Image: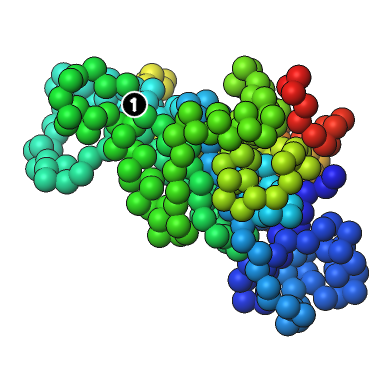
């Protein structure tokens, strides 16, 4: 079964999704205009819709350390099964930046006076924790713009505390991050949480099994928990009728570096980092005469590098910007997996 197509009106307000056959018929008849949004095919109506009835829709969220899942579901249909790679590189990047900053302090070069502590009397969150929860929030904000939402159902995760005091839990970055996430998520739609053991009870009641292979790109790895959370909010069939996955990977950008990790010959510094490449925003989807559709990466010697849309593999480093026809801008890489052999999750999975 193909994924349902998100629909919006002329003002961009999301409406109930429709089946691909109906969406293609609207496009042929001139009733709708198709467009791609972050790897998902959508349609925009060119006329007033015949009805604006909205069915209750819930989003189940299953957070994870390496992979996480979001499922958009109503009582009648499962509209989207999204499995996302978590942001895991920020901790190492901050460590490298701290090491290089400390090394520069021993050089006999003029330096500015230390500025005041900007984090004084402010709520602070570790950069790696903040990046993880910001990534989840960006995915939820994108879903809200594509689907009419009812509520979010989130599996509440807890950190293991080492102390015995009541205030010990507030020192965990995980606890601080999830509280910030719940607060920001509540500005989009109502939020309900379920404990891990409650999710397991819901899954066992429906007769569904979760895979032990956490890094596998299958419905039973993470999306099954997100599906049962959404099912607890809106109800519907006891077996998921849609198990096709949309896998997304966030694009990793490098911060602008005035001092490279290794000095260049002749003392000349090369350009590195930033989010722009010769006037093009990195992540822009372009049409190239030789490499077809690709997205823009870094820059070198007046040329830009192009990367594969699905795998992220670099195709070239010497593409001329004048030959790149801009299509859209990506925030992440999306891959729609093939239709599985069965549309149901058996107990063997």
- Front residue of 270/23: it is 23
> Does 284 appear above or below 168?
below
Q: Position of residue 141 (x, y in %)?
A: 51, 55
**Furthest residue toward front:** 205
**Image point 70% across, 65% down: which residue?**
16
Residue 279 visible in the shown view: no
Locate the N terminus and report the quarter of the image it occupies: top right
Q: Secondary structure at mark 1?
A: loop
Quarter of image, res 305? top right
Residue nearer the viewer, 118 or 314: 118
Image-based side of 139 in relation to 235, left or right = left
Left/right of residue 230 with respect to residue 99 in the rendered view: right
Circle 1 is placed at which residue position? 159
Q: Is residue 155 visible?
A: yes
Q: Is residue 37 placed above or below 306 in the rendered structure? A: below
Q: Residue at x 64, y 24 (%)?
A: 210
Q: Position of residue 68 (x, y in %)?
A: 55, 33
Position of residue 209 measured from the top left corner of the image (x, y, whole percent): 67, 25
Q: Nearer the viewer, residue 261 or 64?
A: 64
């Amino acid at each position: 079964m193909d994924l349902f197509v998100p629909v919006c009106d002329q003002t961009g307000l999301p409406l109930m999704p429709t089946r691909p056959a109906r969406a293609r018929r609207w496009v042929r008849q001139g009733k709708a205009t198709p467009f791609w949004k972050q790897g998902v095919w959508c349609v925009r109506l060119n006329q007033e819709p015949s009805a604006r009835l909205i069915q209750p829709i819930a989003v189940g969220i299953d957070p994870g350390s390496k992979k996480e899942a979001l499922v958009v579901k109503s009582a009648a249909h499962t509209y989207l099964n999204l499995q996302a790679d978590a942001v895991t590189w920020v901790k190492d990047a901050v460590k490298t930046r701290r090491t290089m900053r400390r090394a520069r302090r021993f050089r006999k070069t003029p330096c500015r006076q230390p500025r005041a502590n900007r984090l004084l009397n402010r709520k602070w969150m570790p950069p790696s924790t903040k990046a993880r929860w910001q990534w989840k929030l960006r995915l939820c904000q994108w879903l809200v713009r594509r689907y009419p939402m009812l509520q979010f159902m989130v599996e509440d995760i807890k950190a293991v505390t080492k102390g015995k005091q009541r205030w010990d839990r507030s020192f965990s970055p995980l606890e601080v991050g999830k509280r910030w996430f719940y607060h920001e998520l509540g500005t989009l739609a109502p939020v309900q949480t379920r404990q891990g053991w409650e999710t397991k009870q819901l899954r066992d009641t429906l007769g569904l099994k979760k895979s032990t292979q956490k890094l596998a790109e299958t419905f039973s790895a993470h999306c099954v928990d997100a599906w049962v959370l959404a099912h607890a909010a809106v109800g519907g069939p006891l077996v998921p009728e849609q198990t096709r996955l949309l896998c997304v990977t966030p694009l990793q950008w490098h911060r602008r570096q005035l001092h490279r990790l290794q000095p260049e010959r002749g003392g000349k510094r090369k350009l590195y980092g930033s989010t722009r490449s010769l006037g093009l925003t990195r992540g822009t989807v372009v049409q190239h005469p030789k490499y077809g559709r690709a997205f823009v990466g870094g820059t070198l010697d007046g040329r830009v590098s192009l990367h594969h849309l699905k795998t992220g593999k670099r195709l070239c480093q010497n593409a001329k910007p004048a030959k790149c026809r801009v299509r859209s801008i990506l925030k992440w890489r999306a891959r729609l997996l093939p239709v599985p052999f069965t549309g149901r999750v058996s107990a063997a999975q």
